[in-house]
Amino acid sequence: MPADTTDIPPSPSPAKKKIGITEEGWLTDCWYLAAMSNELVAGKHLNREILGQPVLLGRSGDGKAFALRDICPHRLVPLSSGKQIDTDGTPTIECPYHGWRFGTNDGVCKHMPSLTPEDKTEPSRVKVRKYPLHEANGAVYIYVSHNPRFDGEPELAPPDFGQLPDAPSFVIVEDFNAHMDDAVVGLMDPAHVPFVHNQWWWRPPSSGFKIKQKPFEPRTRGWAIARHKPSGNSKLYSMVFGDEVTTEIVFQLPGMRWEVVENEKARFFTLTCLTPQQEKSTRVTQITWIENAPLLKLASPIVKRMGRTFLLQDKEMVDLQNRGMKYQKAMLWIDDIDVQAKWYQQLKREWAASRTEKRDFTNPIQARTLSWRS
Ligand code: FES
Ligand SMILES: [Fe+2]
């Protein structure tokens, strides 16, 4: 029987290359936390893996932080194994193998020692990837474009959390053995608290379950639990801050979540930043700034230990989850406890779509009250 050509579906158009998301599912054209300011010492540098790529993070002698791809384009030696050196008044980093020198500010090669005056090779035509960098309040963020050759001002403004002290009071860092998505979803999950964080000083099992109802609203590239009075299990907050205390929790792509507890004069600001390293490795950095709360500042070491306990408990759950993920990918998400996880996925899809289609990002989230027992 001759085939009815009209029934033949049109051949699929070649899969459109997606911009704004990598094959590993990491968002690009975003700012990620790369390091803390005090990790970058003048004249020194270090190596990190960010979105699966080697990144050299350093600070030149003049105090300026910089981020370059940590691979020498010549024979692929990590530039971070070299040393910083001045080249005609410009800070450069010298590859340890054949001494090519790259400007820390622009990634452009300034010097190839082997060249004779007759050589035609033009060093300045060789360049390593340079990441736009933003340093504020003791934190260093880099902009990861989908285009490794991107060289300019990012369209997206760097993270801005308003007025904060110059340096955080304390920082907690933990590498989770999880994909960025699973780490994000694990940290925003409201229903695990009574089971995972049930230590006596926070939420002893005897405290029982209560119905929680929280009004959520869309925010810039994310959502927020609108400003409210902290709930019962945060008596600690009221103890330190007095009665007039309010709190606000915000999530923003690509993976930043912050919680503000404040009254008229004091402020306790905790920012959690997730930075993808490898497919199954995500760095979780929790940065706390304390303003005008001397009592809390004094208690910082204790609060830090408490925060660490929380993070390690979450990390342990992720490790357990990995045992199941070895055999199965699909999860079963229910309302309302997994709504935030669904929002996160929606936001990511919209981010990638808006980049690919070269249009503005439209927040897909609708204001809504979520309820659960915890
Ligand atoms: S490998 Fe870097 S200069 Fe040759
Ligand atoms: Fe948790």
Image (cartoon, rainbow, N blue to C red):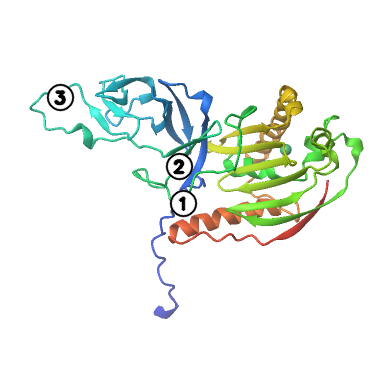
Position of 26 relative to 107 (above/below):
below
Residue 195: assigned label: none
What residue type is disc 3 on? Leu
Badge 3 vs badge 2, beta-carbon distance below 8 Å: no
* Number of numbered discs overlaid on the protein picture: 3
Q: Is residue 1 at least partly visible in the picture? A: no
Image quadrant in which the N terminus is located: bottom left
Q: x, y (%) of residue 24? A: 50, 44
Q: Which residue, given by chain and number where applicable, does mark 1 sit on?
A: 20
Position of 27 relative to 85 (above/below):
below
Q: Which residue, given by chain and number where applicable, does mark 2 sit on?
A: 143
Badge 1: few (under 14), some or many (20 or more) residues near its Cα, within 10 Å? Answer: many
Q: Which residue, given by chain and number where applicable, does mark 3 sit on?
A: 115
Q: Residue at x 58, y 53 (%)?
A: 220
Which of the 4 image quarters holds residue 148? top left
Of 279 and 351, which appears nearest the observer?
351
Q: x, y (%) of residue 319? A: 66, 33
Image quadrant in which the C terminus is located: top right
The earlier-in-sequence mark between 3 and 2 is 3
What residue type is disc 1 on? Gly
Q: CA distance from mark 3 to mark 2?
A: 34 Å
Badge 3: few (under 14), some or many (20 or more) residues near its Cα, within 10 Å? Answer: few
